[in-house]
């Protein structure tokens, strides 16, 4: 990665040494010492320091930077919140380490966990400094340039298809937003384990790193100096920065200070000449002579304007979750969500739950359902145990990658948990083992599922609101369609929950939504299905396939719809797995209508029919011996179709077979084993079946009969949703048979 340093004309071979005297500045940030000024001037945006080691950005990072630097995106403000958020993360990290080793914090100003923002109007430099964990030389190289995260290419792709730059933080590449406003950036950083280094780049494909021997020693932490572009001068205005911090970084848990400069009136001793002149020229002076005499002994003063500077605190660090829910407004919850989730889109969270758990294990929690699923929610679902909850112990941030605070299927929730029960001064690994975590997890799941249920309860599309007052109705109108929205974004997670969480299966099943033969294009719940069940109906009927449109035409539904039974359409591949775990609901069993075992009341004629078609069914079963067909039976589900192929109850359905075949790494021997035994079900009322019966009775050795029966079977396979093992053979047979048995075929196909 390292490329040869290009010698430039700048005389920086011996950078000036650290200045001894830093002047009377308040705690910290004395970055504008003369030496630093000279240094900054000498490089003056022409070229990077010649003595530095130079590196190329990783290709994806370089593309990302190109996009940012050339972006016409108008909301350039976002860079500040990204830098403050990084500073806050770095402070969280050092505070966490200090729990087990106090020494890491250092002494004096270095131990102050705060963020400082400073402006240099003249040189157009905006600096953001934190006393966080800092970066070693290696960290600087990796974190700011050479390692592309998974979010880098995802974000580049998103931007190329017209995505919103505002979402940069969610992709974990927020730092690079600095190039929206700066054309040259320096990152000065000091980690406890390394010397102080300067990273610098003009976003031209390369960055440079040098050991820092000229700036003020930071003690520990990072200072980012943005050399602002001309068109970004507004970020040198104190008021602008104050507004931005208020808007975006209000909920940062560390104090954010801005170095502000004010003109104030000060009383200074007046020199004698001036005071005597003043006495003569002031008419009031004569009038007040008596009083003047009394005060004669007091020294004469005058008021002059003086410029003073001070650190002004910009945020209130009281954590939202520690406040009573009654005191927090909806707007505050929304803003807190945006800052917590780094989701600065326009949409509010769909729902939230703010509660305190009491008893043996005490904690406060605030959970949110985001308005949209993140881009990578189901990517590496099974390899990623990290929940999106931030864990705090007594207000101290511990981790946002804590395994097992929530089960995987609830990973789409964002939020925080602050526990008073967990110990503070133990390692993350020890904490991970703590017995209270189980209780916390259990309570969080309950609350999360309640919160999701509430989205449905408050949605007028879900429940009739005829008993509601007008005020309640208008409140509900806002929530209209919210559950369908939730379902579209996170429905798969609920299904995965049903598969994975046996304890909460019934609660989760209540949240399940689907379309059905009676749902009229809307989503229905299992409770609705049950309320619509026909008297005497024992099972909940469903069918699986790749689309609703395809399923609506399925021959498996013929008798069921005629008899007015409702059938659920499951069209997501995960549904096949789901239905292996969801056996029953409210004492009703689930029945896949394309599998064996469908009962639709008693058919009094069945016995006679069986008898009448016995010769055909026996003959056909024998003819299909090599096809994994277990038996040939009279069907109770068909009306217009001559026959279908159903699968055994515990084997794969036709749809599942297709899903498994589509999986690159699936094991073909397992496929053969799991493929359900097939049963050919015939429709005794269909003319072609009747004709086949007659033909078998006449001459069951006829080649034409065998060909036709095979063709009818293969057509049934296709109609039942199976892939034909040899489509070419089917095509050949169709053409051949169509010549020989045209009249019969016409009945099959049309
Ligand atoms: N002020 C800082 N102190 C210490 N490390 C930092 C600082 N700023 C950035 N980093 C490091 O650089 C990395 C890249 O930052 P970047 O903002 O691009 O991504 P991120 O912080 O991981 O994600 P996000 O943008 O969502 O905050 C960080 O993960 C962190 O390791």
Image: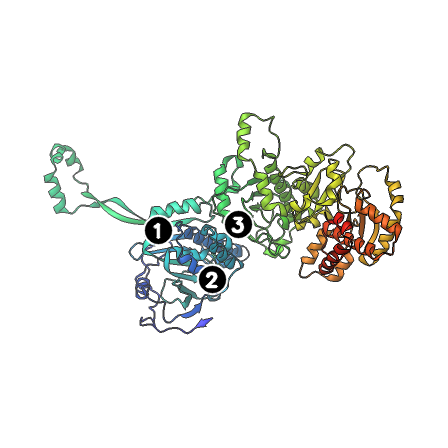
Q: Is residue 721 visible?
A: yes
In the drawing, does residue 166 fall left or right of residue 8?
Answer: right
Q: Of circles 1 and 2, which is in front? A: 2
The mark closer to the camera, 3 or 2, is 2
Classed neighbour count for the residue bearing mark 1: other residues with Cα under 10 Å, few (<14), some (14–19), many (≥20): many
Residue 246 location (% of width, % of height): 41, 44
Image disc number at residue 612: none
The yes-or-no answer for disc 2 within 8 Å of ligand 1 is: no
Asked which secondary structure carries label 1, the reply is helix
From the image, tell me which residue sits under label 3: 396
- The residue to which callout 1 is attached is 235
SS class, disc 2: helix
Q: Which mark is residue 61?
A: 2
Who comes first in sequence, dot 1 or dot 2? 2
Query: From what the image shows, is residue 12 above or below residue 670?
Result: below
Q: Residue at x 57, y 50 (%)?
A: 388
Residue 28 x, y percent position in the rendering:
38, 56
Give the alpha-carbon distance from disc 3 to disc 2, as whole Å: 33 Å
Q: Residue furthest left?
A: 280
Q: What separation in Å lies between label 1 and label 3 (alpha carbons)?
A: 32 Å
Does 215 appear above or below 738? Answer: below
Horizontal arrangement in the rendering, residue 91 relative to residue 391 (left or right): left
Nearer the observer, 299 or 658: 658
Q: Position of residue 537 (x, y in %)?
A: 77, 35
Residue lying at 56% horizontally and 40% vertically, measured from the top left: 351
Q: Is mark 3 within 8 Å of ligand 1?
A: no
């Amino acid at each position: 990665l390292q490329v040869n340093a290009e010698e430039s004309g700048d005389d920086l071979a011996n950078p000036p040494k650290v200045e001894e005297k830093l002047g009377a500045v308040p705690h910290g940030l004395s970055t504008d010492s003369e030496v630093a000024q000279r240094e900054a001037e000498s490089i003056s945006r022409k070229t990077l320091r010649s003595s530095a080691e130079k590196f190329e950005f990783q290709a994806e990072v370089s593309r990302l930077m190109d996009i940012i630097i050339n972006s016409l995106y108008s909301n350039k403000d976002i860079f500040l919140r990204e830098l403050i958020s990084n500073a806050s993360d770095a402070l969280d990290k050092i505070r966490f380490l200090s729990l087990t080793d106090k020494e890491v914090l250092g002494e004096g100003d270095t131990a102050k966990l705060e963020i400082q923002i400073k402006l240099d109007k003249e040189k157009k430099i905006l600096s953001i400094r934190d006393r966080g964990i800092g970066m070693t030389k290696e960290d600087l190289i990796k974190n700011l340039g050479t390692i592309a995260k998974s979010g880098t290419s995802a974000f580049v792709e998103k931007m190329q298809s017209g995505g919103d730059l505002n979402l940069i933080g969610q992709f974990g590449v927020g730092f690079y937003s600095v190039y929206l406003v700066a054309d040259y950036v320096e990152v000065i950083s000091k980690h406890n384990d390394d010397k102080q280094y300067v990273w610098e780049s003009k976003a031209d494909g390369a960055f440079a790193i040098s050991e820092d021997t000229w700036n003020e020693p930071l003690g520990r932490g990072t200072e980012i100096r943005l050399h602002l572009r001309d068109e970004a001068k507004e970020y040198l205005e104190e008021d602008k920065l104050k507004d931005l911090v208020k808007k975006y970084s209000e909920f940062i848990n560390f104090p954010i200070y801005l170095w502000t400069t004010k003109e104030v009136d000060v009383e200074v001793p007046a020199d004698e000449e001036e005071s005597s002149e003043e006495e003569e020229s002031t008419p009031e002076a004569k009038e007040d002579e008596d009083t003047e005499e009394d005060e004669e002994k007091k020294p004469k003063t005058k008021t002059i304007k003086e410029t003073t500077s001070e650190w002004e605190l910009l945020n209130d660090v009281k954590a939202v979750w520690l406040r009573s829910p009654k005191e927090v407004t909806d707007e505050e919850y929304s803003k807190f969500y945006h800052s917590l989730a780094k989701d600065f889109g326009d949409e509010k969270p769909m729902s939230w739950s703010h509660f305190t758990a009491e008893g043996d294990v005490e904690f406060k929690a605030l959970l949110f359902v985001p308005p949209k699923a993140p881009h990578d929610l189901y990517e590496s679902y099974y390899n990623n145990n990290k929940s999106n909850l931030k864990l705090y112990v007594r207000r101290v941030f511990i981790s946002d990658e804590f395994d097992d605070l929530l089960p995987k299927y609830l990973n789409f929730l964002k939020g925080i948990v602050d526990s008073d029960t967990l110990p503070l001064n133990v390692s993350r690994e020890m904490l991970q083992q703590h017995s209270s975590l189980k209780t916390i997890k259990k309570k969080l799941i309950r609350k999360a599922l309640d919160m999701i249920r509430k989205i449905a309860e408050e949605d007028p599309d879900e429940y009739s609101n005829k008993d509601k007052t007008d005020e309640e109705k208008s409140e509900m109108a806002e929530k209209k369609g919210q559950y369908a929205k939730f379902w579209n974004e996170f429905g798969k997670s609920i299904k995965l929950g049903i598969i994975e969480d046996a304890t909460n299966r019934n609660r989760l099943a209540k949240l399940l939504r689907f379309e059905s033969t009676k749902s009229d294009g809307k989503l229905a719940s299992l409770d609705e299905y049950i309320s619509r069940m026909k008297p005497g109906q024992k099972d909940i009927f469903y069918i699986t396939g790749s689309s609703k449109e395809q399923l609506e035409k399925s021959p498996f539904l013929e008798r069921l719809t005629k008899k007015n039974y409702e059938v659920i359409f499951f069209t997501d591949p995960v549904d096949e797995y789901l239905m292996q775990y969801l056996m029953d609901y409210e004492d009703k069993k689930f029945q896949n209508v394309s599998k064996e075992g469908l009962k639709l009341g008693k058919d009094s004629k069945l016995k006679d029919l069986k008898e009448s078609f016995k010769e055909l069914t026996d003959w056909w079963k024998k003819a299909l011996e090599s096809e994994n067909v277990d038996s040939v039976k009279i069907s109770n589900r068909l009306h217009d179709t001559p026959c279908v192929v159903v699968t055994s109850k515990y084997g794969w359905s036709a749809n599942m077979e297709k899903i498994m075949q589509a999986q690159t790494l699936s094991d073909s021997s397992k496929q053969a084993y799991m493929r359900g035994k097939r049963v050919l079900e015939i429709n005794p009322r269909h003319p072609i079946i009747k004709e086949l019966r007659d033909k078998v009775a006449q001459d069951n050795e006829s080649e034409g009969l065998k060909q036709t029966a095979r063709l009818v079977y293969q057509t049934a396979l296709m109609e039942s949703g199976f892939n034909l093992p040899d489509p070419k053979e089917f095509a050949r047979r169709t053409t051949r048979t169509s010549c020989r048995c045209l009249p019969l075929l016409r009945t099959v196909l049309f």
